[in-house]
Amino acid sequence: MKPKEIIARRIAKEFKDGDVVNLGFGIPNLSASYLPDDVEVTLQAENGALKFGAPPTKKTLDPDYSNSGGMPLTLKKGASTFSMPTSFAIIRGGHVDLTVLGALEVDQQGNIANWLVPGKLAPGMGGAMDLLVGAKKVIASLQHTDKKGDSKVLKECTLPLSAPNCLDKIITDLAVFEFQDGKLLLIETAPGVSVDEVIEATEGDVIVSDDVKEMDI
Protein backbone atom coordinates (compact mmCIF):
# COMPACT_ATOMS: atom_id res chain seq x y z
CA MET A 1 0.00 0.00 0.00
CA LYS A 2 1.37 3.43 -0.95
CA PRO A 3 2.12 5.96 1.81
CA LYS A 4 -0.61 8.38 0.76
CA GLU A 5 -3.21 5.61 0.75
CA ILE A 6 -2.15 4.48 4.24
CA ILE A 7 -2.65 8.02 5.53
CA ALA A 8 -5.97 8.55 3.74
CA ARG A 9 -7.41 5.26 4.98
CA ARG A 10 -6.36 6.04 8.55
CA ILE A 11 -7.86 9.54 8.36
CA ALA A 12 -11.21 8.01 7.42
CA LYS A 13 -11.23 6.12 10.72
CA GLU A 14 -11.48 9.48 12.50
CA PHE A 15 -14.88 10.28 11.01
CA LYS A 16 -17.74 10.11 13.49
CA ASP A 17 -21.40 9.76 12.59
CA GLY A 18 -23.05 13.17 12.28
CA ASP A 19 -19.82 15.19 12.13
CA VAL A 20 -19.29 18.22 9.91
CA VAL A 21 -15.81 17.66 8.43
CA ASN A 22 -13.50 19.90 6.42
CA LEU A 23 -10.76 18.17 4.43
CA GLY A 24 -7.67 19.99 3.17
CA PHE A 25 -5.88 19.70 -0.15
CA GLY A 26 -4.15 16.51 -1.21
CA ILE A 27 -4.11 13.53 1.13
CA PRO A 28 -7.00 14.67 3.36
CA ASN A 29 -9.31 14.93 0.35
CA LEU A 30 -8.35 11.40 -0.67
CA SER A 31 -9.84 10.12 2.59
CA ALA A 32 -13.34 10.88 1.27
CA SER A 33 -12.91 7.76 -0.90
CA TYR A 34 -12.69 5.62 2.25
CA LEU A 35 -15.71 6.84 4.21
CA PRO A 36 -16.95 3.97 6.40
CA ASP A 37 -20.27 2.55 5.18
CA ASP A 38 -21.86 2.88 8.61
CA VAL A 39 -20.78 6.50 9.17
CA GLU A 40 -22.58 9.52 7.76
CA VAL A 41 -20.62 12.78 7.79
CA THR A 42 -21.27 16.13 6.17
CA LEU A 43 -18.21 17.26 4.22
CA GLN A 44 -17.69 21.02 4.00
CA ALA A 45 -15.57 22.86 1.42
CA GLU A 46 -14.41 26.32 2.40
CA ASN A 47 -15.20 27.74 -1.05
CA GLY A 48 -18.88 27.12 -0.35
CA ALA A 49 -20.16 23.55 -0.54
CA LEU A 50 -21.78 21.34 2.06
CA LYS A 51 -22.47 17.62 1.85
CA PHE A 52 -20.38 16.00 -0.85
CA GLY A 53 -18.84 12.58 -1.24
CA ALA A 54 -15.94 10.74 -2.81
CA PRO A 55 -14.15 12.29 -5.80
CA PRO A 56 -16.02 11.72 -9.08
CA THR A 57 -15.00 9.35 -11.84
CA LYS A 58 -14.26 10.57 -15.37
CA LYS A 59 -17.85 9.71 -16.30
CA THR A 60 -19.49 11.52 -13.38
CA LEU A 61 -17.16 14.53 -13.25
CA ASP A 62 -18.83 17.93 -13.51
CA PRO A 63 -16.29 20.76 -14.07
CA ASP A 64 -18.63 23.25 -12.38
CA TYR A 65 -18.22 21.52 -9.00
CA SER A 66 -14.86 21.74 -7.25
CA ASN A 67 -13.40 22.20 -3.80
CA SER A 68 -11.22 25.08 -2.63
CA GLY A 69 -8.17 23.43 -4.17
CA GLY A 70 -9.79 23.23 -7.59
CA MET A 71 -10.25 19.47 -7.39
CA PRO A 72 -13.59 18.06 -8.60
CA LEU A 73 -16.18 16.87 -6.12
CA THR A 74 -19.51 15.06 -6.17
CA LEU A 75 -22.47 16.74 -4.52
CA LYS A 76 -24.74 14.33 -2.66
CA LYS A 77 -28.51 14.46 -2.26
CA GLY A 78 -29.38 17.34 0.05
CA ALA A 79 -26.14 19.25 -0.69
CA SER A 80 -26.01 23.03 -0.72
CA THR A 81 -23.70 25.66 -2.18
CA PHE A 82 -23.25 29.17 -0.87
CA SER A 83 -20.94 32.17 -0.78
CA MET A 84 -17.42 32.18 0.63
CA PRO A 85 -18.42 34.56 3.49
CA THR A 86 -21.15 32.12 4.53
CA SER A 87 -18.67 29.25 4.41
CA PHE A 88 -16.24 31.08 6.68
CA ALA A 89 -19.07 31.99 9.04
CA ILE A 90 -19.60 28.23 9.45
CA ILE A 91 -15.91 27.73 10.18
CA ARG A 92 -15.40 30.73 12.45
CA GLY A 93 -18.66 30.04 14.23
CA GLY A 94 -17.33 26.72 15.54
CA HIS A 95 -19.66 24.53 13.47
CA VAL A 96 -16.91 22.31 12.00
CA ASP A 97 -16.40 19.25 14.20
CA LEU A 98 -13.20 18.06 12.53
CA THR A 99 -10.68 19.43 10.07
CA VAL A 100 -7.86 17.40 8.57
CA LEU A 101 -5.14 19.42 6.88
CA GLY A 102 -1.97 18.52 5.06
CA ALA A 103 1.30 19.80 6.49
CA LEU A 104 4.87 20.57 5.50
CA GLU A 105 6.05 20.28 9.11
CA VAL A 106 4.56 19.55 12.52
CA ASP A 107 6.16 19.54 15.94
CA GLN A 108 5.82 18.20 19.46
CA GLN A 109 4.14 21.38 20.70
CA GLY A 110 1.20 20.83 18.37
CA ASN A 111 2.35 23.48 15.91
CA ILE A 112 1.77 23.16 12.17
CA ALA A 113 3.39 24.78 9.13
CA ASN A 114 1.48 24.13 5.93
CA TRP A 115 1.38 27.17 3.70
CA LEU A 116 4.83 28.40 2.73
CA VAL A 117 6.93 26.11 0.54
CA PRO A 118 10.57 27.25 0.47
CA GLY A 119 11.53 28.66 -2.92
CA LYS A 120 7.98 28.71 -4.24
CA LEU A 121 5.53 31.58 -4.60
CA ALA A 122 2.74 31.29 -2.05
CA PRO A 123 -0.31 33.51 -2.69
CA GLY A 124 -1.27 33.30 0.98
CA MET A 125 -2.40 31.04 3.76
CA GLY A 126 -5.91 30.54 2.44
CA GLY A 127 -8.43 29.23 4.95
CA ALA A 128 -5.96 27.16 6.96
CA MET A 129 -5.62 29.56 9.87
CA ASP A 130 -9.40 29.86 10.22
CA LEU A 131 -9.85 26.11 10.23
CA LEU A 132 -6.99 25.52 12.66
CA VAL A 133 -8.51 27.80 15.28
CA GLY A 134 -12.18 27.37 14.39
CA ALA A 135 -12.64 23.60 14.18
CA LYS A 136 -13.39 21.61 17.32
CA LYS A 137 -10.75 18.99 16.47
CA VAL A 138 -7.67 19.41 14.28
CA ILE A 139 -5.62 16.64 12.68
CA ALA A 140 -2.46 17.10 10.60
CA SER A 141 -1.64 14.54 7.93
CA LEU A 142 1.68 14.22 6.13
CA GLN A 143 4.30 11.78 4.96
CA HIS A 144 6.67 11.17 7.85
CA THR A 145 9.87 12.08 6.00
CA ASP A 146 10.82 14.22 3.01
CA LYS A 147 12.45 13.02 -0.20
CA LYS A 148 15.85 13.11 1.48
CA GLY A 149 14.63 10.94 4.34
CA ASP A 150 14.62 13.81 6.85
CA SER A 151 11.88 13.87 9.46
CA LYS A 152 8.95 16.26 9.06
CA VAL A 153 7.80 15.50 12.62
CA LEU A 154 10.03 17.83 14.58
CA LYS A 155 10.97 19.20 17.96
CA GLU A 156 10.17 22.66 16.61
CA CYS A 157 8.88 23.75 13.21
CA THR A 158 11.38 25.68 11.08
CA LEU A 159 8.88 27.07 8.55
CA PRO A 160 6.40 29.89 9.27
CA LEU A 161 3.51 28.56 11.32
CA SER A 162 -0.07 28.44 10.16
CA ALA A 163 -1.21 28.32 13.80
CA PRO A 164 0.47 27.46 17.11
CA ASN A 165 -0.47 24.73 19.59
CA CYS A 166 -3.58 23.76 17.65
CA LEU A 167 -3.16 20.08 16.78
CA ASP A 168 -5.00 17.25 18.48
CA LYS A 169 -3.44 14.45 16.43
CA ILE A 170 -0.85 13.74 13.72
CA ILE A 171 -1.31 10.98 11.15
CA THR A 172 1.61 9.91 8.95
CA ASP A 173 2.40 6.91 6.79
CA LEU A 174 4.37 5.47 9.72
CA ALA A 175 2.47 6.41 12.86
CA VAL A 176 -0.28 8.23 14.73
CA PHE A 177 0.67 10.68 17.48
CA GLU A 178 -1.16 12.61 20.14
CA PHE A 179 0.54 14.93 22.64
CA GLN A 180 1.65 14.55 26.23
CA ASP A 181 3.84 16.81 28.40
CA GLY A 182 5.12 18.78 25.42
CA LYS A 183 6.17 15.63 23.59
CA LEU A 184 4.77 13.33 20.92
CA LEU A 185 2.71 10.43 22.26
CA LEU A 186 2.98 7.45 19.93
CA ILE A 187 -0.34 5.60 19.94
CA GLU A 188 -0.29 3.66 16.65
CA THR A 189 2.19 2.33 14.12
CA ALA A 190 1.51 1.53 10.47
CA PRO A 191 1.29 -2.14 9.47
CA GLY A 192 4.76 -3.66 9.32
CA VAL A 193 6.39 -0.67 11.06
CA SER A 194 8.01 -1.13 14.47
CA VAL A 195 8.09 1.34 17.35
CA ASP A 196 11.87 1.60 16.97
CA GLU A 197 11.51 2.48 13.28
CA VAL A 198 9.08 5.27 14.12
CA ILE A 199 11.40 6.69 16.78
CA GLU A 200 14.34 6.52 14.37
CA ALA A 201 12.38 8.45 11.71
CA THR A 202 11.12 11.12 14.13
CA GLU A 203 13.18 14.17 15.12
CA GLY A 204 10.77 15.15 17.89
CA ASP A 205 10.80 13.63 21.37
CA VAL A 206 8.58 10.56 21.51
CA ILE A 207 6.74 9.04 24.46
CA VAL A 208 5.62 5.50 23.66
CA SER A 209 2.11 4.74 24.85
CA ASP A 210 1.67 1.70 27.09
CA ASP A 211 -0.92 0.48 24.60
CA VAL A 212 0.53 1.09 21.13
CA LYS A 213 -1.71 -0.41 18.45
CA GLU A 214 -1.32 -1.18 14.78
CA MET A 215 -3.30 1.15 12.50
CA ASP A 216 -6.70 -0.18 11.52
CA ILE A 217 -6.75 0.53 7.80
Image (tube, grey):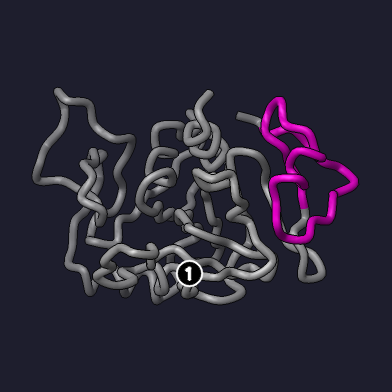
Q: How many marks?
A: 1
Q: Residue at x 78, y 36 (%)?
A: 213
Q: Which residue is mark 1?
A: 132
In the depicted view, which residue is nearer to us: 111 or 214?
Answer: 111
Q: Residue at x 44, y 39 (%)?
A: 31
Tell me the quarter of the picture where residue 119 sits: bottom left
Tell me the quarter of the picture where residue 45 sits: bottom left
Residue 125 pos. (x, y %): 34, 71
Magenta span covers which residues?
Answer: 186-215
Residue 48 pos. (x, y %): 22, 60
Establish if 161 lies above or below 35: below
Quadrant of the image containing the C terminus: top right
Establish if 114 lies above or below 38: below
Q: Secondary structure at mark 1?
A: helix
Establish if 204 lies above or below 182: above
Left or right: 147, with 119 as reference point: right
Left or right: 72, with 115 as reference point: left
In the depicted view, which residue is nearer to us: 3 or 36?
Answer: 3
In the depicted view, which residue is nearer to us: 103 or 148?
Answer: 148
Residue 27 pos. (x, y %): 42, 43
Can I make out residue 15 in this image? no
Is residue 11 inside the magenta stretch?
no
Can I make out residue 122 in this image? yes
Left or right: 108, with 66 as reference point: right
Q: Residue at x 39, y 54 (%)?
A: 24
Is residue 209 inside the magenta stretch?
yes
Residue 152 pos. (x, y %): 58, 55
Q: Amino acid at mark 1?
A: Leu
Q: Residue at x 49, y 70 (%)?
A: 159
